[in-house]
Amino acid sequence: MIVDLRSDTVTKPTPAMHQAMMQAEVGDDVFGEDPSIISLEKKCVALLGMDAAVFCPSGTMTNQIGVKINTQPYDEVICYKGSHIYKYEGGGVAGNSLASMRLVEGDRGRISVKEIESNINNVNDTHLPVTSLVSLENTVVREAGSYYTLDQIKMVSEFARSRGLKMHLDGARLFNALVETGDKAVEYGKYFDSISICLSKGLGAPVGSVLICKKELETKARRMRKAFGGGMRQAGFLAAAGIYALDNHITRLKEDHTRAKTLGKELRALTWIKSVMPVDTNIVIFSIKESSTPEKVLARLNEHQIKAIKFGPQEIRLVTHLDFDDRMLNRTVEVLKKISV
Ligand SMILES: *Cc1c(COP(=O)(O)O)cnc(C)c1O
């Protein structure tokens, strides 16, 4: 039995999802004629309470389009210093949007009104880039899946908009946050100009992300998708997997969280662990005491067919998902307890 905890992107389609994919009606989406994509986009519009949605190959692309359509070259984007759009998108914001990023500390990645206020540039000072966008991440991957409540989002958004700023959400794991807070997805649309969601993380689709946005941004978003090389043809097979995922794999995310919390609790009791970040959703990040290294721990785990990744100088990350069940959880706990590192 191989246990893969490197990411929640490693899942394979379930038999039922596979069947939905095989039965998908498809057409050429660049001509706007793929019924499955049209239906996925409509579903996302209704789900998030916005006007338009654009199906894309990856969450990096939906974020890059989100930043692009909400900024002008030479603008500045306020975001958390460990955010995906800053750290893990290959410098895309610099290259695609010609924008700079103003990095803030956040409370476990959650940006406050105060942090935004103190980082908005004076628009009359020509030394400074024009602050035009705030980008939030929910859940925050670098902070072990910490999440915002809708009330926190509302406060940030209302303040940012009162100062003329646009709002983008990197909601790669938005549904992980929602199953914890009980907030309604449909409320989210009010507070953002664009929202990116990933179908290929915890939701378990093989490929795909969706950018949901305001009506007036749709044409620009579709043009940018084309320009970035993301116009796909009969991609309805993938959209069908996304529809299946949204219909069937949201509420079960709670199971992933329960298993992640169990891993966190068991890890805290081990002598070679220095600390474990609070486990809020499906991501477990822990530090190892100086007497060992992540490489050593990962090698020991590998000998038992358990895969994880290094996530900092002394850190390791484990992510639970659809293809990680209780049997695998028990096996992982057993191995963690017995390895010597
Ligand atoms: C995975 C992820 C993305 C998008 O990643 P892709 O691999 O490009 O789909 C965006 N934001 C966050 C926080 C992520 O974890």
Image (tube, grey):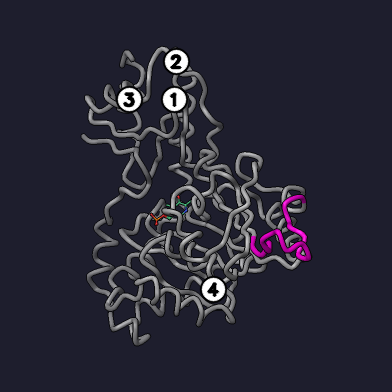
Labels 2 and 1 touching (C-beta < 8 A): yes
Quick check: 113 left or right of 303? right
Disc 2 marks which residue? 290
> Mark 4: which amino acid?
Ala
Q: Nearer the viewer, residue 142 or 224?
A: 224
> Does the beta carbon of the residue at mark 1 sit less than 8 Å from ligand 1?
no
Residue 6 located within the stretch drawn in magenta: no
Residue 138, position as x, y percentages in the image: 56, 51
Say if 21 sits above or below 341 in the image.
below
Residue 156, position as x, y percentages in the image: 72, 56
CA–CA distance between discs 3 and 2?
Answer: 12 Å
User: Does dot 3 land on a helix, a strand or a loop?
Assistant: helix
Q: Residue furthest front?
A: 127
Disc 3 marks which residue? 295
> Mark 3: which amino acid?
Glu
**Which tag, 2 or 1, sits closer to the chain's start?**
2
